[in-house]
Image (spheres, rainbow, N blue to C red):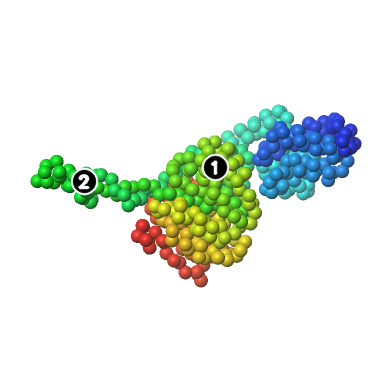
Amino acid sequence: MPAAAMSTGAGEPLRGRLAENIIHFGRVLRKAGMPVGPGKVIEAIRAVEAVGIRHKDDFYWALHAVFVNRFEHRELFNQAFHIVWRKPNFLAELQKVQLPPLAPPENVKKANRRVSEAAVAERGDEDKVEQEKKEIELDASFTYSDKEVLQKVDFEAMSIEEQARAKDAIKRMRLPIVEVKTRRFAADPRGARIDMRRSFRAGLRYGGSFILLKRKRHRRRRPPLVILCDISGSMSNYSRMFLHFVHALTNDRDRVHTFLFGTRLTNVTRHLKQRDVDVAINKVRDAVEDWSGGTRIGLTLREFNLVWSRRVLGQGAIVLLVTDGLDRDAGVGLEGEIERLHKSCRRLIWLNPLLRFSEFEAKSSGVRVLIRHVDDFRPVHNLESLDDLARALTADGPVGEGVEPYLPKDVPALGSQSQVRGHG
């Protein structure tokens, strides 16, 4: 930052290259994933003109007030600010050498990967060309597919580029669900049951002297799909990627109902029916007020059971419960609500990102309650886990190890509800 610009006081117009640096800072934030457009950059310049830059705290909070609108953006802004405004080219210099300094600044140690890439992306054209050459040389040394590597990358550890490629892959995903019998019948000459009404009507043509038997079969239809997705702070990175998967499902089939919950329950089904995924996600963000907060699983399931279950759980619905099971209320009231939900649906599948750890154990009170009332227990932390989910839902019943390997010794298994009702 030019020394001449540092003497600017409150209410004075910006001099030197300070305005250009603010524009550069806005681009870094946008590349890091924050919704920063030209309008916000102009507001940031006006805010800095109003408060001045003689005090570092005033400068920091002026930009913070303009660029940060959501809780989850605070850490990204803080890391980007300390990288860009202290020494903008530090990351670029750091990545040019093979051996990093022995004691890099603390803000670089803790810098978010997406923020680091966004800051480096704003370098000159020559550096970009050199970086592309290095990437090409590096990729040529590998013999396995880059697509296969992306399948196993954890959503939380993905870079900006990897997230974009993962979202494109999710758009092309399809979730085939096995069709189930309904109570209604359809005409079928090879059906197992005789349609008496149609048979007698056909016999009227011959005056009742000859009756040609008509047959029928049960109609088959894909059951409704109900998704209950946790959007608390511990689930934020996974729930955002999973929403893209849910958007693809909503636009691929009928009767998909999506609910988000943290400390309250929000029905976002209508918003996800937008064809444009960006428009749909923005509408969901505006509709949800408790994003990245706490989790009250028992309270939100109670609201779902009382208000929504009779509307959306008919005709053997399949329920996907996406949560890590960490409950702020320590499982209070959860036992009865999850049991009621389990008995109201055809299959209850719990998707938990904590299953990516081989040392996972059901220790928290919420997990110990939930695990007794689900038909299947699966991870949801990368593209490969979503593919496995698609294959599991193709079969009419649990696939793989199920819940038993994760049950504590002092927690009895209740058995699959689909088997109890004769669906299996």
The image shows residue 3 at horizontal and vertical percentages of 88, 35
Q: Which mark is residue 271?
A: 1
Relative horizontal placement of residue 382, taking residue 79 as reference (left or right): left
Which residue does the image show at 83% across and 44% down from the upper left? 58
Which residue does the image show at 73% across and 36% down from the upper left? 40
- Residue behind mark 2: 198
Q: Earlier in the sequence, mark 1 or mark 2?
A: 2
Relative horizontal placement of residue 72, taking residue 216 as reference (left or right): right
Q: Amino acid at mark 2?
A: Arg
The image shows residue 197 at horizontal and vertical percentages of 21, 48
Name the front one of labels 1 and 2.
2
Local SS, label 2: helix
The image shows residue 341 at horizontal and vertical percentages of 47, 59
Is residue 70 among what the camera can see? yes
Q: Amino acid at mark 1?
A: His
Of 383 and 331, nearer the camera is 331
Which residue does the image show at 70% across and 44% down from the upper left? 69
On-image quarter of the N terminus: top right
On-image quarter of the C terminus: bottom left
Q: Are marks 1 and 2 in contact (CB under 8 Å)?
A: no
The image shows residue 377 at horizontal and vertical percentages of 48, 57
The Cα–Cα distance between marks 1 and 2, rounded to whole angstroms, is: 44 Å
